[in-house]
Each structure stands twice: as C-alpha cells, then as structure tokens.
Amino acid sequence: EDKVVQSPLSLVVHEGDTVTLNCSYEVTNFRSLLWYKQEKKAPTFLFMLTSSGIEKKSGRLSSILDKKELFSILNITATQTGDSAIYLCAVTFNNDMRFGAGTRLTVKP
Amino acid sequence: DSGVTQTPKHLITATGQRVTLRCSPRSGDLSVYWYQQSLDQGLQFLIQYYNGEERAKGNILERFSAQQFPDLHSELNLSSLELGDSALYFCASSPKGVAADTQYFGPGTRLTVL
C-alpha cells in the first residue's frame, strides 16, 4: 500500500533551536516530494524535490531527498515563534498524491 | 493571498443533501486540484483537472464529482452527504499541472453536515 509517514508527529522547541522533520515514503513510480507549511488555514508551498541528494534552501529552511532510502528531511535553523505550524509532506506518484499526517511544530519564546 | 478563491467559506447542510463548492484558480493557471482535510484523515488528494479534462484521481468517493469549465473555474459536487463528509475542502491551482508545478491553495470551504 502506498504510504507517507512523517515523524515526529509533534515537536516543541525553544526559539533559536534547530529542528529536523522527517518524511519517509513507500510508493510506486515516485515523481516528486513536496513540503508544505500549514498555519491557520491553507497550506503554503515550501519545497519540491525530485532529485536525490540536491539540497533545496530558502532562508533558514532547507530540505533534501534520499531516493535510495526513500525519505526526506526538512531542517529549520534558528527557529522563531512564527515557524510554529503543521509541516506536511506529500508525495506524487503515478497520477496520485499522498500526504503524511504532518508534524506539529511549536516554537516557544 | 494566493490568488485562488473558493466559495462559499462555510456551508452547513443536512445528511442526504447535495452541495456544490466552487473554485477560481489564479489567473493563467490551467490546473485545479481538490483536497479534503478532516481531523481523522488528514489532508487527502481528491482529483485534478487540467484545462477542462480530468488529469489525476485520488481518494474521491463515487458520491463526489468535479468538473472544470471553459473559463477554468472548477466545481466539486458532493451528494448523498454523510456526517463523515464534514471537513475542510481545499482547492489549489498550478500553471501547468505537472509534477514540477507549485500548487497555490485557496482558503478552503468548511463543510458541516448535520
């Protein structure tokens, strides 16, 4: 069965900490892996990864994909309270798309 | 503001009824996606349309259907509603609808089935 698993489900850190969020997947005919940030309402796009070993970076956020081991990580350095959100990982495969359950990140002042 | 609009924002209806959710994509985007987000199931991909034609299908029930019109807006029709259909329904759009596209999400329609 095609699945996407995120860990941890929940994480509480303090401002300035660095966090690593994990996403592993088992799908047939993988196409891409996407990371989204969801605060109060709609998800906002962060990264899309299709090639193994190439890091995508945007400010304090970065992500990398390992297609051999079937996982991706999302790193956030020097966390801020505004980073508090649910981070969703999604994998596209064949003509379908599957989301993980998300990681709820809480950044305390 | 992503540029994707969805109406209505909230919808309350009864079991057995039928509702239509509407989505207008960003100007120039040809592809529209529909998602369902509920507390127990998380975010689930339902269906994708590209330039009026169905492109991809996810976990969409037979009671649900969608279409994309010539002006590229899309409607999601939900019929024979059940309590379990209560959820937040998102629409997203992208320029081409291929794996390399960024999807821009609308604000969602919250459906409550009583």
Image (spheres, coloured by chain):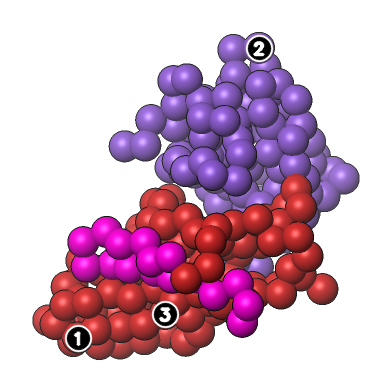
Chain colours: A red, B purple
Q: Identity of the amino acid at label 1? A: Asp
- Residue B95 placement, left or right of B77: left
The numbered dot on residue A17 is: 1
Q: Bounds of the magenta span?
A: A54-69
Neighbor class of circle 3 (other Cα within 10 Å; few <14, some 14-19, many 20+) is many
- Can you name the residue that lies furthest to the top here? B70
Mark 1 and mark 3 in contact? Answer it, CB < 8 Å.
no
For the residues bearing labels 2 and 1, Cβ distance under 8 angstroms: no
The subunit carrying tag 3 is A
Magenta stretch: includes residue A62: yes
Depth check, front residue: A16 or B85: A16
Q: Give the Cα separation between the discs numbered 3 and 2.
A: 41 Å
Pointer 3 residue: A21
Q: Amino acid at mark 3?
A: Leu
Name the residue beneath numbered marker 2.
B70
Q: Nearer the viewer, mark 2 or mark 1?
A: 1
Circle 3: element type: strand
Mark 2: amino acid: Pro
Residue B37 percent location from the top left of the image = 58, 58
Cα–Cα span, label 1 and label 3: 13 Å
Q: Is residue B81 visible?
A: no
